[in-house]
Image (cartoon, rainbow, N blue to C red):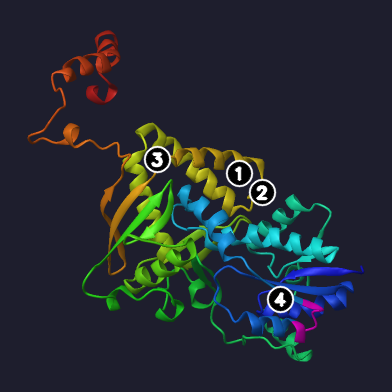
Amino acid sequence: MSGKVVLAYSGGLDTSVAIKWLQENYGLEVVALTIDVGNESDFTAIKEKALKAGAVKAVVIDAKELFVNHFIFPALKADALYEGQYPLATALSRPLIGKLLVDVARDEEAVAAAHGCTGKGNDQVRIEVSVNALAPDLKVIAPAREWGMTREETIKYAERYDIPVPVTVASPYSIDENLWGRSIECGVLEDPWVEPPDDAFAWTKSPKEAPDAPGYVEIGFEQGIPVAMDGKKMSGIVLIQTLNELAGSHGVGRIDHLENRLVGIKSREIYEAPAAAVLLRAHQALQAMTLSREQLRFKQQVTMEYADLVYNGLWFTSLHEDLAAYIQSSQRYVTGTVRLKLFKGSCTVVGRKSPYSLYSYGLATYDKGDVFDQSASAGFIHIWGLPVKTQAQVQGTSRLEKS
């Protein structure tokens, strides 16, 4: 091949080695693309490292605002948790990376896009399917999947070509992080019987070391989007960053998940997602107050489908558009404030209010002010139970009763 390839570049071992490898094996000029989704890296150093490794150009894009408004908050409105536990932090960033790979490839008139994912994970699927959806003509190259080198061999390759890398064979964990969460893999964590050691965590205190007094926080929502914290309006980026620090200081947001990967492997995944844990809990509480029973139950079905879709790399699909349209409609009245208690690893909803609340004190109370017409219940029960009574009269009692 000849021409340019745009490589999603993190500055880590695999993508650093991939620059030289793509030149050697494909004869392509490499444009290194680094995307800031809240990973708080030294992007100047990463850019310099890419150029030293042989890239003809290094591009850094600040995509935090795009990530929050067009990926994180839509997923929050959907209550997206894969298998009920994982808030999809890494999974949500991959379609964004795929889109920006395509954008830069078009700008650079590149013939291919590349990434550093291995052949065992989910991210290869998410990035490649996204690129295929947005630019079917672009070739996608996955060096780490093709070269067949072990971790130790990759390090030796880097040393042979004097490629600076930040890891050694003894480095215990593989880490990916962005605004919405931090994922930790490898090392002792691959044994599902072993408790994650404290050095695996960086964003959350151990619950035993968290403050002995609980912390309280109020989250204000407008149409399903968090817009304020403790009454103070904030941008999405600042709100998530602030909440990550607060909830993390109380040990909130640790997740130990035995996960079913798309490629058919069960893997043990450790996550830290303090802000996600709090915001998802708050959003669900506000929905419970402002959506009808039927809306809530149907949305639970949509939520599971949506989370699977994101996890499986199908962001740029018609099905996603269809599900997103329902979710957006469901959020019309999800406006209000939720108060939460943070204490030694737990996050508990302790208050909620909304101008669109379907909760009526007059209907719910057993004290003075009760407006519920209890005399109407007799007729309701008669009609509701009529099919049960009729069947019992004709066919007798249930098998359970007979036994």
Label 3, label 4: how far apart the Cα atoms are: 45 Å
Label 2 Cα neighbours within 10 Å, binned few <14 / some 14-19 / many ≥20: some
Horizontal placement of 143 versus 266: left or right? Answer: right
Magenta region includes residue 52: yes
Q: Residue at x 82, y 63 (%)?
A: 112
Q: Earlier in the sequence, mark 1 or mark 4?
A: 4
Disc assigned to residue 333? 3
Task: Answer above or below: position of 262 versus 238.
Answer: above
Residue at label 4? 15
Q: Secondary structure at mark 2?
A: loop
Q: Which residues are magenta?
A: 51-57
Q: Nearer the viewer, residue 112 or 222?
A: 222
Q: Nearer the viewer, mark 4 or mark 2?
A: 2
**For the residue marked with disc 1, what is the amino acid?**
His
The answer, for residue 40, to whether it is visible in the render is yes
Label 1, label 3: how far apart the Cα atoms are: 22 Å
Q: Nearer the viewer, mark 3 or mark 4?
A: 3
Magenta region includes residue 79: no
Residue at label 2? 316
**For the residue marked with disc 4, what is the amino acid?**
Thr
Q: Residue at x 12, y 31 (%)?
A: 370
Q: Residue at x 26, y 26 (%)?
A: 400
Contact? badges 2 and 3 (CB < 8 Å) = no
**For the residue marked with disc 2, what is the amino acid?**
Phe
Residue at label 1? 320
Label 1 Cα neighbours within 10 Å, binned few <14 / some 14-19 / many ≥20: some
The answer, for residue 140, to whether it is visible in the render is no
Q: Position of residue 117 (x, y in %)?
A: 68, 68
